[in-house]
Amino acid sequence: MIRTTHDFLNERKSQGSRVGMINLGCARNLVDSQAILGRLKKNGHRLVEVKDCDVAIVNTCSFVEEARRESVDCILDLIDLKKSGKLKKIIVAGCLAQRFGTELAQEFKDVDAFVGTPAFTKDQIPAQVYLTPRHFAYVKICESCFNQCSFCAIPKIKGKFSSRSLETVVAEVKALDEKGVKEINIIGQDITAYGMDLYRKKSLAALLKEIAAATKNIEWIRLLYAFPAHMDDELIEVMASVPKICPYIDLPLQHINDRILTAMNRGITKQATIDLLTKIRRQIPQASLRTTFIVGFPGETDAEFDELVSFVRQMRIERVGVFVYSREEGTPAYFYPNQVPERIKKQRLDRLMSEQKLIAQKVQEGFLGRRLRVLIEEKQRNSDGLYLGRTQYDAPEVDGLVYVHSQKSLTIGDFTMVEVTDAFEYDLTGRVVETK
Ligand code: SF4
């Protein structure tokens, strides 16, 4: 039976553990880590930096090969620390432990426990212990995924899709609002499926309206991880009409060729995707979109890949991430014939990225001379009046930054008007023109 981190540490509570957490993977993992930390703190453990801890927890990711490698490298570093006497215990939690716990336990004898992803049911997420800065927060509204994309192991790893109740989410957001948080990022594997289990209908639009009405300090509400086939008119309408909702959406498309979309089980066609993007552009003209594509999906021909490249050129999506297809055990696509050789996958990734690079540079140049509202995030160390911030078009930790020159001192977490003076592929430079 897979034990939770909480169970494991409770057995050792009498030893007065000083616990350090390393979070790997996506923002969704970060939210799980926050919840684990919240539970640990509530149960009397001391949360400290990893360099000062007795017990290190690493919350791992196993989404793709690269993530698994990063997780294993981290485990090896912790084992070195333990061998040198600087660490007493190592706990490996999260997706990797859930999926490969038995095999890993045989390989890494110095790890004290492999524990599965804690079963955070919809109303049990505890008071947050923030890993994020005070001015922004992630709010997870649902767990696992409603969809069955043929390449993805997440629904199998995480179990049944479950939405948190609307009241619970709004209460959490209100608490963040009272603490002075300025930006919330709504996350979940597929936030557009929110409510389909609990309320028997898509309820994200209703939730966003409630959140917007219930908050004073929160000025940016950002939507991360929407499923294209679930994006409906009501949601686009709410995004267009509620000023607090950032004109930004992370909408992973994965591919555009109809045969591949069907093989991926994405529930959408090329034409429906184009219609959706056109509708978003029409109703939210300033929208900045982020998407991801998978290249080298089994059977992807040169012509199908070229179709994807043409689509990227035509649609000019502002932020694009490209991944090579990773063959995941336990997924239908694992058994698909005509797996694409790694060399070809890599070539396709490089080609698509270089196409996107040109588009990204042009998008950024479009900001030159414009005045943008920037959320100041940190002061550049050893600099005279240089700060780092983000616009409403940039999500924390994945998108670009604005390097802000200011003659007067700026406060972290405040909004500032900045005139853009230079544009790079991902980042912008500007100077303060007015402080709110
Ligand atoms: S939408 Fe598809 S790719 Fe994303 S988590 Fe769900 S099943 Fe996986």
Image: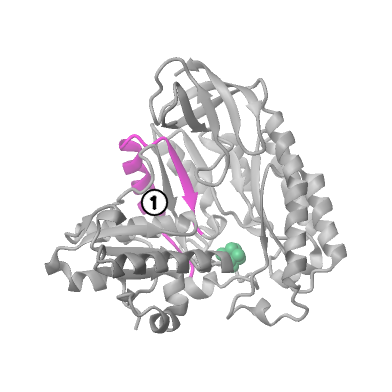
Residue drawn where x is 59% and y is 27% of the image: 429
Return the residue nearer the eye: 293 or 388.
Answer: 388
Q: How far from the left and from the top, in percent, is residue 19?
A: 25, 60
Q: Is residue 56 left or right of residue 291?
A: left
Can you name the residue that lies furthest to the right here? 303
Return the residue nearer the eye: 207 or 332.
Answer: 332
- Would you say residue 118 is visible in this rendering? no
Residue drawn where x is 80% and y is 62% of the image: 257
Total numbered labels placed on residues in the image = 1
Is 255 placed above or below 89 here? above
- Would you say residue 188 is visible in this rendering? yes
Give ligand 1's quarter of the image. Answer: bottom right
Can you name the residue that lies furthest to the front here? 84
Please identify the quarter of the rendering in which residue 134 is found.
top left
Q: Quadrant of the C terminus?
A: top left
Residue drawn where x is 68% and y is 65% of the image: 266
Bin the neighbour count of mark 1 within 10 Å (Cα to Cα): few under 14, some 14-19, many 20 and up.
Answer: many
Q: Quadrant of the N terminus?
A: bottom left
Q: How far from the left and from the top, in percent, is residue 137?
A: 41, 44
Q: Residue under circle 1?
A: 169
Return the residue nearer the eye: 163 or 41.
Answer: 41
Determine if the magenta segment contains residue 298.
Answer: no
**Mark 1: which amino acid?**
Val
Determine whether the residue tagged by mark 1 lies in a helix, strand or loop: helix
Residue drawn where x is 52% and y is 67% of the image: 69
Is 148 placed above or below 177 here? below
Determine if the magenta segment contains residue 166.
Answer: yes
Stretch in magenta: 160-188
Return the residue nearer the eye: 92 or 285.
Answer: 92
Q: How far from the left and from the top, in percent, is residue 214?
A: 39, 38
Q: Is residue 306 left or right of residue 68?
A: right
Please identify the quarter of the rendering in which residue 126 is found.
bottom left
